Amino acid sequence: MLLWAVLVLEEFSTAYSRKLVSAETKLPGSLEPSYRRLHALHLQDEQRHVQLDSVLIRELMKNGNPLQRGMNAQLFRFFFRQVLNPRHSGPRVIRYLVTEYPELNRHLADMLRAVRKLGMDPGLQNIMNDSGQMPVTHALLAEYPGFRWY
């Protein structure tokens, strides 16, 4: 379950990074140069992680116990439904942030509303559910459909 979650998060990160680089290409100078370089290095690193994650997952799936695979699939689906539709932890983090930084209190309602809408955010959903944006994840989900969260 953990490797699947890491894969999804790292491939999501690469998809998001590609969008950021694409935006910079369309509007040169919109990113600070050192941030752009750092971001490009991070993107390369994440792409390597995605490849390693997929190899590890395939090995574990091939050699793993079917009962454990089923339990991991259930846990993974539950985890991602919670992550993609924050109901408790996201608002709790925001409330804690406001206690740490009271000057944010005037934005509390807006921040809570925004985090509750994340599960329906078309930008997030488009990246997560698009096999073109996350090809490695979707290839593995095609091989192991029990892990699909959607």
Image (cartoon, grey):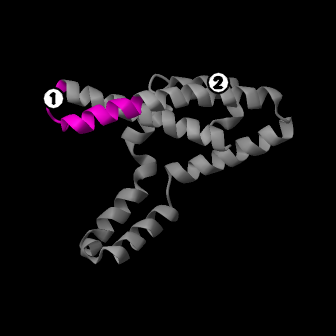
Nearest the viewer among 85 and 56 is 56
Nearest the viewer among 11 and 139 is 11
**Few, some or many residues within 10 Å of mark 1 (<14, 14–19, 20+):** few
Relative to 91, 68 lies left or right: right
Relative to 83, 114 lies left or right: left
Relative to 29, 92 lies left or right: right
Question: On screen, 5 above or below 98?
Answer: above
For mark 2, give the secondary structure: helix
Residue 130 image offset from top left, x and y in percent: 47, 28
Q: Quadrant of residue 60?
A: top right
Determine the CA span between mark 2 and mark 1: 36 Å
Residue located at (72% from left, 45% from top): 74
Residue 102 image offset from top left, x and y in percent: 29, 77
Confirm whether the magenta stretch covers residue 27. Answer: yes
For mark 1, give the secondary structure: loop
Q: Quadrant of residue 18?
A: top left
The image's mark for residue 96 is: none
Badge 1 is on which residue?
27
Amino acid type shown at disc 1: Leu
Badge 2 is on which residue?
142
Residue located at (52% from left, 23% from top): 135
Q: Which residues are magenta?
A: 26-43
Q: Quadrant of residue 95?
A: bottom left
Residue 61 image offset from top left, x and y in percent: 76, 30
Question: On screen, 59 above or below 115?
Answer: above
